[in-house]
Amino acid sequence: MQPDAAPSPLPRLDPADPRAAEVLLPLVYDELRRLAAARMAREAPGQTLQATALVHEAWLRLGGEHQPAWANRAHFFAAAAEAMRRILIDNARRKLALRHGGQLEKLSASDTAFDLPAAATDDRELLLINDALDALAAHDPRKADLVKQRYFIGLTLEESAEVLGISVRTAKRDWVYARTWLYHEVQRLRG
């Protein structure tokens, strides 16, 4: 979405209408796909989850063919941000689970344990950020929502301010505060 383009409002849809999802999906799919692609571009190399899969999984978690009555665009994208965050966290947890190798490092066949160490995965970092974000949500839910919009969906400050119904100036202040707070919380969680 261009900063000067006005977002299209979501139409009021009756969740009991079997065609509600058919009407909603084309209206939001391209934007969700763009946001997911931007988010996935920041993931560690070797990420197996693709942007399209992230959007489809988020759509299913939001209700799939049985979409709830979204109050407005902000309501929908806040829910989408939370769904994408949970998917990425679940994916990171799954990849770090003991049955999937746990804390073991990946090495290519040409590498040895004495040569080049495998690149550190961002999954541990993502889980630390998630734990810190949960703590921030308990401390200040609005700032946590702003982080979800920016970090997990990739909205700009202006787009996030619009979705959250706050001024851009407030969003900038909240963003600085949240980043600082999360930095200190992640450092604390690292021990």
Image (cartoon, rainbow, N blue to C red):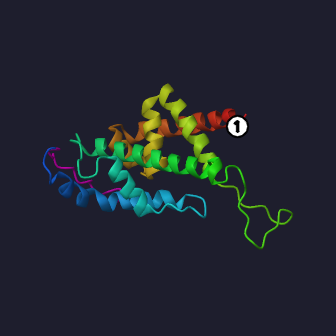
| Secondary structure category for the residue under label 1 | helix
Q: What amino acid is at disc 1?
A: Arg
**What is the quadrant of residue 114 in the picture?**
bottom right
Q: Nearer the viewer, residue 36 or 2?
A: 36
Counting the numbered discs, the total is 1
Residue 191 placement (x, y as % from top left): 73, 33
Q: Left or right: 99 with respect to 148?
A: right
Please give the name of the residue rendered at 15% of the width and 47% of the height, measured from the top-left corner: 13
The magenta span reads 1-15
How would you rate the neighbour count of disc 1 (Cα within 10 Å): few for under 14, some for 14-19, many for 20 or more? few
Residue 36 placement (x, y as % from top left): 43, 58
Rendered view: 43 above or below 138: below
Residue 101 placement (x, y as % from top left): 67, 53
Rendered view: 157 above or below 134: below
Provide the major secondary structure of the magenta segment.
Answer: loop
Please give the name of the residue rendered at 50% of the width and 50% of the height, measured from the top-left corner: 88
Please give the name of the residue rendered at 68% of the width and 32% of the height, measured from the top-left corner: 188
Q: Left or right: 127 with respect to 172?
A: right
Please give the name of the residue rendered at 56% of the width and 49% of the height, measured from the top-left corner: 94
* Label 1 sits on residue: 190
Q: Decide whether residue 172 is among the magenta residues.
A: no
Q: Nearer the viewer, residue 1 or 31?
A: 31
| Quadrant of the image containing the N terminus | bottom left
Q: Nearer the viewer, residue 99 or 149?
A: 99
Residue 9 placement (x, y as % from top left): 21, 50
Which residue is situated farthest in the front direction here? 99
Q: Decide whether residue 7 is among the magenta residues.
A: yes
Q: Left or right: 118 with respect to 36?
A: right
Which residue is situated farthest in the bottom direction here? 110
Which residue is situated farthest in the right direction here? 114
